Image (cartoon, rainbow, N blue to C red):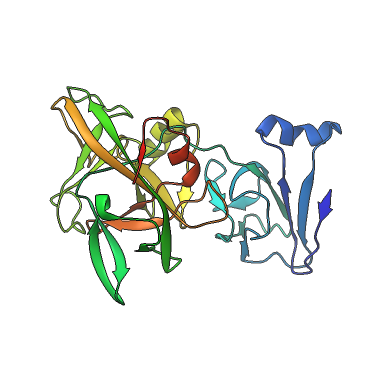
Amino acid sequence: MISYSIMVGGLWLRFYESKTLADAHSYNTEINSSFADYPYYGQPPSTFTIPTDLAYNKWAVSSISDSVIGIDPAATYSRGDILSLNLENGSTYAQVFFYPAPSPSTAFCFKEDSKILCLKDDKEVEVKIQDLRPATLVKTVDKGYMKVTVVTKSMLNNPAGSERVKDKLYKCSKERYPELSEDLYITGCHSILVNTLSLEQQEKIKATFGRLYITSNKYRLMAMIDERAEPCIEPGEVAIYHFALDNDEICYNYGVYANGLLVESCNTKDIMSRKDVILL
């Protein structure tokens, strides 16, 4: 067991190293479960940061005090995320316990010719995704410029019809996404990063992917869930590309800009677990 103490306020944070929610809950019945404690003593802080020295990058809530508001128990959080802590009814103590968050099982991809905002010769330029290579510097929303570590290509057999399914291409149009410089095409599991989700979107994401996900302190809104994204109805094979950026955690992804729209990058684990990709 690893234990840490920070003398700040009346908040008890615990991070289980257990891989599942059931394993995390098993601690309460004294079944073996290792964890790291971060207690805050005194007045509860208004914000707290997910520690950066944890073993895993992505964390989900396993249990939370009823007095805590403003922390979504169905979302996932990353090391370094800053969370606001609000307590109702004059409460002066709260506890929030976390466990390693599962990841969506389907990789997310860009159609050929999508333009990624990069840094070249000290200037920000858009680079077609098929032209990215390891060491290319990509602009992120909150981590500066990060090096590409892997770029891959695969083929998507786009199904006919307008059914909103995962393995399908979706069109993000300039008319529906004003920040776009031109239309963007991404696969169904690829997420636009947004500040808020409607209740209907939250329910659809949880029904399809199990829980809500957060990247760069923004919610992931998958294209198949986002009513603004239009399913591409024409059947046929389409070249799609994936890229990951440098990080010691293979499940880590970033907020990046594609055709001007803030979306998520892929992570190394999801890309390299696919058997149908070609390394570029």
Q: Who is closer to the viewer here, 131 or 246?
A: 131
Q: Is residue 48 left or right of residue 199?
A: right
| Towards the viewer: 13 or 103 | 103
Residue 8 x/y as whole percent = 75, 69
Residue 71 seen: no
Is 139 above or below relative to 270? below
In the image, what residue occupies the spot 17% across and 26% down? 236
Q: Residue furthest right?
A: 30
Where residue 198 sits, quadrant-wise, is top left
Q: Residue at x 30, y 27 (%)?
A: 165
Instruction: Please tell me whether residue 81 is drawn above or below residue 266 in the rendered image.
Output: below
On the image, the x and y values in percent for residue 224 come to 30, 34
Q: Position of residue 97 (x, y in %)?
A: 69, 46
Q: Quadrant of residue 121?
A: bottom left
For this view, does 97 lie left or right of residue 167? right
Q: Position of residue 64 (x, y in %)?
A: 66, 45
- Residue 222 figure quarter: top left
Q: Looking at the image, is 191 positioned above or below residue 143? A: above
> Residue at the spot x=22%, y=23% of the render?
159
In the image: residue 239, left or right of residue 206: left
| Residue at the bottom extreme of this rendering | 122
Tag count in the figure? 0
The answer to whether any part of residue 172 appears in the image is yes
